[in-house]
Image (tube, helix red, strand yellow):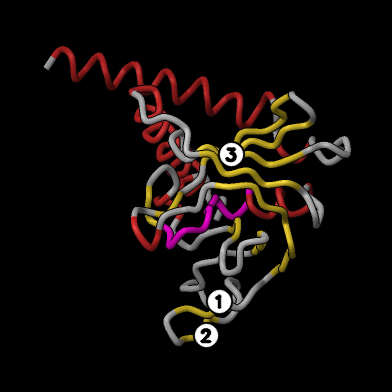
């Protein structure tokens, strides 16, 4: 029982420090001007998306990934091919209207398609999925993060999806990412 209580305290402290750095130290809204070599790096094991300007990490965003098998998020180097605000979502033979009209639209407010057809970075209608493996292979993020990222990146920007390592730190980051999503939902940032 003591170990569980200590683990909860450590996770809460980590969440507060990570949340502070997400919200206060480097808000995405302040990072609009990047050098030509800016790129996006997605680390699957940490469930984090980094916006890097040269070798400097400018922004860190918690994300949701695909599971295993056919829904796995593909590792590789890609580019942003298109950015669509208020996209329709075509899934399993059904068309979902833009998110502001249809809250079942799984793409949220924005789609950033990568150079692998049918895959992309996007918002979500399931903010509690952040930090987990629940997508069909795409990289989901909280809607406000996705919207701001879409204003930050340019068509042709590099996107690298890395497998990473599955260590104890990665497991703790998944918990922190889920708490970040919970905080965003509670604060009304859908």
Of pointers 1 and 3, the one earlier in the residue sequence: 3
Q: Which residue carries the number 3 mark?
A: 61
Q: Dividing the image into 4 quarters, which one contains the C terminus?
A: bottom right
- Distance, label 1 to label 3, CA atoms, is 23 Å
**Label 3: element kind:** strand
Task: Check contact, mark 1 vs mark 3: CB within 8 A.
Answer: no
In the orientation shown, which residue stands out farthest toward the left? 1
Which quadrant of the structure image shows residue 9?
top left
Q: Dividing the image into 4 quarters, which one contains the N terminus?
A: top left
Give the crowd class for mark 2: few <14, some 14-19, many >=20 residues within 10 Å: few
Give the crowd class for mark 3: few <14, some 14-19, many >=20 residues within 10 Å: many
Which quadrant of the structure image shows residue 56?
top right
Magenta span contains residue 166: no
**Who's the residue at 68% across and 42% down the image?**
40
Of pointers 2 and 1, the one earlier in the residue sequence: 1
Task: Check contact, mark 2 vs mark 1: CB within 8 A.
Answer: yes
- Distance, label 2 to label 1, CA atoms, is 6 Å
**Who's the residue at 63% across and 39% down the image?**
41
**Residue 102 as seen in the image, left or right of residue 85:** left
Tell which of 69 and 49 is nearer to you. Answer: 69
Tell which of 163 and 2 is nearer to you. Answer: 163
Percent x, y of residue 25: 68, 23
Percent x, y of residue 108: 57, 64
Q: Which residue carries the number 1 mark?
A: 89
**Residue 107 as seen in the image, left or right of residue 169:** right
- Distance, label 3 to label 2, CA atoms, is 28 Å
Using the image, tell me which numbered label, if any, was put on residue 175. none
Tell me where the magenta segment starts and ends, as one range. Answer: 135-145
Using the image, tell me which numbered label, if any, was put on residue 95. 2
Of pointers 3 and 2, the one earlier in the residue sequence: 3
Task: Check contact, mark 3 vs mark 2: CB within 8 A.
Answer: no
Tell which of 147 and 16 is nearer to you. Answer: 147
């Amino acid at each position: 029982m003591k170990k569980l209580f200590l683990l909860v305290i450590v996770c809460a402290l980590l969440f507060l420090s990570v949340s502070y750095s997400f919200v206060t130290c480097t808000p995405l809204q302040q990072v609009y001007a990047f050098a030509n070599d800016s790129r996006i790096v997605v680390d699957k094991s940490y469930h984090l998306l980094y916006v890097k300007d040269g070798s400097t990490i400018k922004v860190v965003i918690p994300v949701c990934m695909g599971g295993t098998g056919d829904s796995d998020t593909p590792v590789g180097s890609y580019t942003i091919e298109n950015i669509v605000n208020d996209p329709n979502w075509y899934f399993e033979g059904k068309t979902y209207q833009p998110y502001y009209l249809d809250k079942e639209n799984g793409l949220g407010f924005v789609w950033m398609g990568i150079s692998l057809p049918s895959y992309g970075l996007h918002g979500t209608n399931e903010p509690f999925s952040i930090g987990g493996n629940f997508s069909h292979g795409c990289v989901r993020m909280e809607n406000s993060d996705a919207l701001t990222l879409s204003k930050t990146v340019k068509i042709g920007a590099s996107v690298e999806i890395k497998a990473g390592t599955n260590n104890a730190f990665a497991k703790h980051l998944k918990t922190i990412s889920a708490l970040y999503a919970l905080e965003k939902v509670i604060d009304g940032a859908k």
